[in-house]
Amino acid sequence: MSTQLDSFETRLLDELDAFREQVVGASGRRRTTRRRIVAGAGVAAAAVAGVLVIPGLGPTAAYSVSEGNSGQITVEVRRLEDAAGLEEALAEHGVAADIRYLPYGQACAAGRYVAVERRLTGMRAALGSSILQIVLPPGAVRDGETFVMWVSGREMTADEMAELEVEEGTTVTQGFHSRVDFDVAAGPVKPCDVVPAARSEAP
């Protein structure tokens, strides 16, 4: 992808920060956002839906997990593969996790867990140069709690990519439709009962 897209993505991320201020309310209730290219929110529960434009993907790892000096954990998902491996990688950083990758348009049914009551300040998700980036601030997932996330997605068709509005001179080589839902469970998490996404409204 050309360097012009770098500034384009930066501008979109700036717009995302402003948009997040609108969707994160004092109540900490679940919000759903739908934006092209990049979308995100982070409160007691959050959902992300959008269209991602990415360069051609080579033989890179499906995911990565890194931890900064402050204890902040960053997860990057590049391909929707090996959810169990990502759970193990997060466990190595002290985070219990329940990760599910689903067909596009599908979701985990409501009622799987009880969400923590506190606000999850600083926890966020965004679509970017990787399919998905999740940031877990220090203490976001405490002992006895579980980070819960499901992701559904599919590759964009050539016609869909041709309809995207991008900067002049930018060539879209690959795209991805994705929907993400993440939260922190206060206790046990039940298995994922896969349903159409419209039927998944609460934990």
Image (cartoon, rainbow, N blue to C red):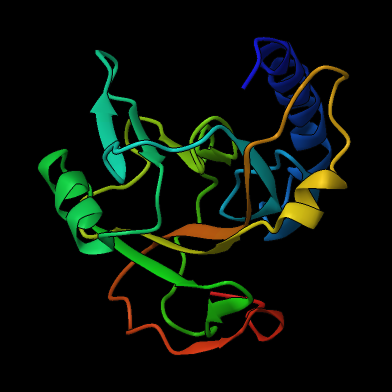
Q: Nearer the viewer, residue 187 or 6?
A: 6
Residue 155 lies left or right of residue 186; in this view the side is right
Q: Looking at the picture, how far across and down is residue 31, in whole percent?
A: 73, 57
Residue 77 lies left or right of residue 126; in this view the side is left
Can residue 25 be seen at all in this image of the molecule? no
Residue 149 sits above or below residue 78 on the image: below
Residue 75 lies left or right of residue 97; in this view the side is right
Q: Which of 61 and 38 is in front in this view?
A: 61
Seen at 50% across and 43% down, the residue is: 132
Residue 186 sits above or below residue 92 on the image: below
Can residue 73 be seen at all in this image of the molecule? yes
Q: Looking at the picture, how far across and down is residue 51, in whole percent?
A: 71, 49
Q: Looking at the picture, how far across and down is residue 203, in whole percent?
A: 53, 74
| Picture quarter with the N terminus | top right
Q: How many marks?
A: 0
Residue 132 sits above or below residue 188 on the image: above
Seen at 21% across and 63% down, the residue is: 84
Seen at 88% across and 36% down, the residue is: 165
Rendering quarter of residue 166: top right
Seen at 39% across and 83% down, the residue is: 192
Q: Which of 182 and 29 is in front in this view?
A: 182
